[in-house]
């Protein structure tokens, strides 16, 4: 999946890691062992610590999640020590971090929207 700090693309939609984590968790539930760590190979998935997209997925799935800092791909994710493990949080901490992730995602999503608007406008594709 594509990602930015606090934002994930899932099913051709961008949203906060918090809002996307539930559907992402459901879509991977059927393809992997429920006791294994999830390798969340998405750019910036570890950025933001307890507010990160990896933490949101750990909370939604109830499983440990390996998140990655900065830009990442399958090759660099396979290197030792390239990721950080996030474990599911207790309910109160998870709720606080959920709200934090959603709040922190707003300026990033606004930036994506402005970039898209400017790109479409500069290409003459204004609707």
Image (cartoon, grey):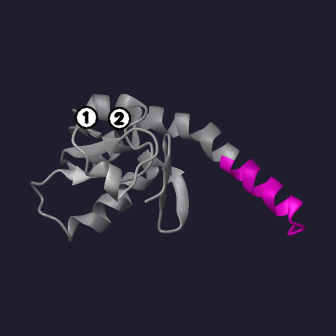
Q: Secondary structure at mark 2?
A: helix
Q: Specify the label residue 95 is tagged with.
A: 2
Query: Which one is in front, 123 or 9?
Result: 123
What main secondary structure does the magenta stretch of the protein show? helix
Where is residue 73 drawn, in percent x and y?
39, 55
Label of residue 91 in the image: 1
How many other residues sit within 10 Å of disc 2, few (<14), some (14-19) or many (≥20)?
Answer: some
Q: Is residue 11 above or below residue 17?
A: below
User: Residue 27 in the image: x percent, y percent?
Assistant: 31, 67
Check residue 11 for magenta coloring.
Answer: no
Direction from residue 15 to residue 21 in the image, left or right: left
Residues at marks 1 and 2, CA–CA distance in whole angstroms: 6 Å
Q: Provide residue 90's location: percent of width, then percent of height.
A: 21, 32
**Residue in the picture at 17% in, 65% down:** 32
* Quarter of the C terminus within the rendering: bottom right
Q: Residues within 10 Å of mark 1 (few under 14, many from 20)?
A: few
Q: Is residue 119 magenta?
A: yes
Magenta residues?
Answer: 112-127
Residues at discs 1 and 2 in contact (Cβ within 8 Å): yes
């Amino acid at each position: 999946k594509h990602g930015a700090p606090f934002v994930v693309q899932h099913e051709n939609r961008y949203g906060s890691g918090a809002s996307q984590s539930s559907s992402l968790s459901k879509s991977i539930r059927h393809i992997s062992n429920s006791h294994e760590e999830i390798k969340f190979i998405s750019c910036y998935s570890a950025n933001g610590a307890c507010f990160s997209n990896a933490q949101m997925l750990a909370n939604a799935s109830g499983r440990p999640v390996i998140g990655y800092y900065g830009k990442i791909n399958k090759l660099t994710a396979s290197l030792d020590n390239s990721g950080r493990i996030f474990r599911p949080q207790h309910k109160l901490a998870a709720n606080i971090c959920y709200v934090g992730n959603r709040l922190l995602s707003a300026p990033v999503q606004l930036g994506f929207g402005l970039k898209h608007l400017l790109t479409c406008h500069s290409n003459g594709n204004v609707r």
